[in-house]
């Protein structure tokens, strides 16, 4: 971790127009929660639908994509990352810092709004906390994954979007084996555990067990961060000539 | 005092060779890396700065490899050619951040000193996005100087600067060189390099074409055969007079009835006086030829309309150096 890198990253992440997206998306979730609560009253099935179907399945991956790629992608694109790389800093510490800042942003703009939406939908219940927890761990994994993607390719946003939409949503729902390889399912395992015995009643069921889910989440978070650092060591900046 | 050493360095991208078997030593003082665009200057600087691995050969700074060695940046200050910085911060914040990234014991003092060196103390509290190109260049310079490095690498630092900023930067570089730092900058303009560089390395088409002091390089460039295109009111008589002189080795008379000639077509745009042809002269001794030509003309009562050095472009000068 490096405080100066974190500061610069946070400023450029929250400084531009990106912040409008970062506010709009969770705004939609909260608005949706208010409308659902107003129309359906306190209904746990509706709450699970919104929290699982929108917050966990759409909001968190999209926020992860925006914050994860945004934490490092623009710097690589315009070449300004050279100011970080031309310093006696460990590349792994740069990568770790980028991931931490991305995850912090995802937590604030995805996990916290998920908690808020849960509270609006169900009042004070552990349903809100359980989904916020799921959003938190999923956000951490997406953050690390998309930071890595941004280091590896200039088309990180497109590839990330395809991944989030096609793999996580489509393949994840129709191909049973693929469901086990999905950040959303691993995070759902955490939510399921947090809900305890109510999970069955609420139809919250992950494709993987808690142990497997946490193990995969850790592998993705640590592995992607490490690999991003390793790629930064041999990042090619220009091919102008 | 630090020395950069390139030993049989090549770099290729796919099957394009960007740098071809270059060996050079860059020591204290100001060194100019001269060459036309696409000669491999940036590739070379990227390898020196540790941002690109040589495909073969080694790049070392005081015996340490620069590739994948982030500790090397304690010694290197790098001014990249690309303009992008962290636009949302002020010049002061950005230079200060660079000082902190270097983990300097007193980052504020270091940032202040660096900004003073490049004369940017007045505008330091404005956002970088509001800076002119020259100001950005100076802030980039300040970030490279902030840790007081013995080696300074600058990629096309004079690009887009107005003459005053250019002179200022030249003064800064000169001072750095005089302090015993190893300063290397790239440029495609001979005059720029000549003014401040104690030694010059010439790159052409990925190859190390020449090296030496500016006098030697200048000499190499002026001693080569020079081509002139001359137009006068009596080309034939002038041709006879010129070829009689030892400073010219060849004269070609081009008559007006030679419409295929590229020179004739080119001269049409320059504005020919009387529809006549031109003379192409190959001068072996450039200095005495330019001295002699007006004398010859006046002695033979010939009026000179146009004297055009045919190949003064840097490209052809470089091409000559390579072919040599």
Image: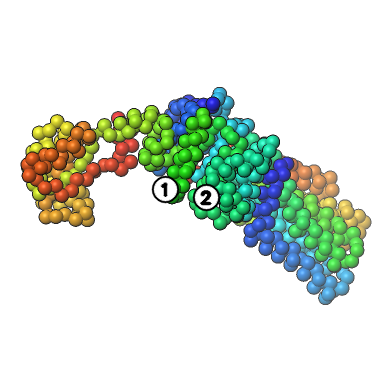
Q: Which residue is mark 1?
A: B163
Left or right position of A38 against B178? right
Residue at 88% across, 70% down: A42
Q: Is residue A163 visible?
A: no
Q: Chain of mark 2?
A: B
Q: Nearer the viewer, residue B170 or B48?
A: B170
Residue at 79% across, 51% down: A137
Q: List x then y, in percent, for residue B4.
A: 51, 28
Q: Kindly indicate the quadrant of the structure image that contains residue B204.
A: top left
Q: List x then y, in percent, for residue B246.
A: 14, 31
Residue at 58% across, 44% down: B115
Q: List x then y, in percent, for residue B188.
A: 39, 41
Left or right position of A216 against B242? right
Question: Does A61 sit above or below residue B72?
Answer: below
Q: Quadrant of the C terminus of chain B?
A: top left
Q: Which mark is residue B149?
A: none
Q: Secondary structure at mark 1?
A: helix
Q: Which residue is mark 2?
A: B135
Q: Is residue B245 visible?
A: yes
User: Which comes before the other along the chain, label 2 or label 1?
Assistant: 2
């Amino acid at each position: 971790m490096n405080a100066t890198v974190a500061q610069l990253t946070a400023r450029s992440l929250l400084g531009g127009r990106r912040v409008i997206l970062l506010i709009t998306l969770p705004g939609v979730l909260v608005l949706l929660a208010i409308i659902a609560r107003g129309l359906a009253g306190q209904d746990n099935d509706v709450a699970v639908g919104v929290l699982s179907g929108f917050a966990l399945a759409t909001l968190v991956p999209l926020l992860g994509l925006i914050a994860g790629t945004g934490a490092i992608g623009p710097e690589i694109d315009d070449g300004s990352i050279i100011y970080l790389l031309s310093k006696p800093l460990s590349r792994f510490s740069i990568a770790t810092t980028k991931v931490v800042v991305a995850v912090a942003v995802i937590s604030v703009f995805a996990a916290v709004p998920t908690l808020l939406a849960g509270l609006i939908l169900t009042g004070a219940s552990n349903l809100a906390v359980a989904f916020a927890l799921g959003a938190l761990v999923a956000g951490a994994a997406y953050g690390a994954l998309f930071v890595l993607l941004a280091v590896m390719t200039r088309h990180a946003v497109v590839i990330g979007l395809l991944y989030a939409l096609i793999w996580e949503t489509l393949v994840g729902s129709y191909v049973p084996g693929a469901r086990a390889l999905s950040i959303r399912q691993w995070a759902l395992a955490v939510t399921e555990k947090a809900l305890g015995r109510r999970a069955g009643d609420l139809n919250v069921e992950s494709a993987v067990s808690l142990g497997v889910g946490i193990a995969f989440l850790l592998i993705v978070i640590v592995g992607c961060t490490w690999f991003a650092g390793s790629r930064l060591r041999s990042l090619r900046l220009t091919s102008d000539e | 005092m630090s020395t950069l050493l390139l030993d049989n360095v090549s770099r290729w991208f796919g099957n394009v060779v960007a740098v071809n078997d270059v060996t050079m030593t860059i020591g204290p003082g100001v060194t100019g890396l001269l060459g036309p665009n696409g000669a491999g200057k940036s590739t070379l600087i990227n390898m020196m700065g540790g941002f690109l691995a040589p495909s073969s050969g080694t790049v070392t700074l005081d015996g340490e490899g620069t590739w994948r060695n982030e500790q090397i940046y304690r010694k290197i200050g790098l001014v990249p050619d690309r303009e992008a910085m962290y636009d949302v911060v002020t010049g002061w914040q950005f230079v200060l951040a660079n000082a902190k990234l270097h983990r300097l014991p007193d980052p504020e003092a270091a940032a202040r000193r660096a900004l003073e060196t490049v004369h940017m103390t007045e505008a330091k509290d404005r956002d970088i996005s509001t800076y002119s190109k020259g100001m950005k260049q100076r802030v980039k310079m300040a970030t490279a100087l902030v840790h007081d490095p013995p080696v300074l690498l600058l990629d096309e630092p004079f690009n887009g600067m107005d003459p005053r900023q250019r002179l200022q930067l030249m003064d800064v570089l000169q001072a750095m060189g005089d302090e015993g730092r190893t300063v290397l900058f790239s440029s495609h303009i001979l005059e720029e390099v000549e003014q401040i560089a104690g030694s010059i390395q010439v790159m052409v088409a990925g190859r190390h074409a020449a090296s030496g002091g500016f006098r030697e390089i200048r000499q190499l460039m002026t001693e080569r055969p020079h081509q002139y295109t001359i137009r006068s009111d009596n080309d034939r008589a002038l041709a006879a007079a010129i070829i009689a002189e030892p400073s010219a080795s060849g004269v070609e008379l081009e008559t007006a009835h030679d419409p295929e000639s590229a020179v004739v077509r080119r001269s049409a745009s320059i504005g020919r006086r009387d529809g006549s042809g031109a003379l192409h002269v190959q001068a072996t001794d450039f200095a005495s030829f330019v001295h002699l030509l007006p004398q010859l003309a006046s002695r033979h009562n010939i009026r000179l309309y146009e004297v055009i050095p045919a190949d003064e472009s840097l490209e052809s000068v470089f091409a000559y150096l390579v072919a040599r």
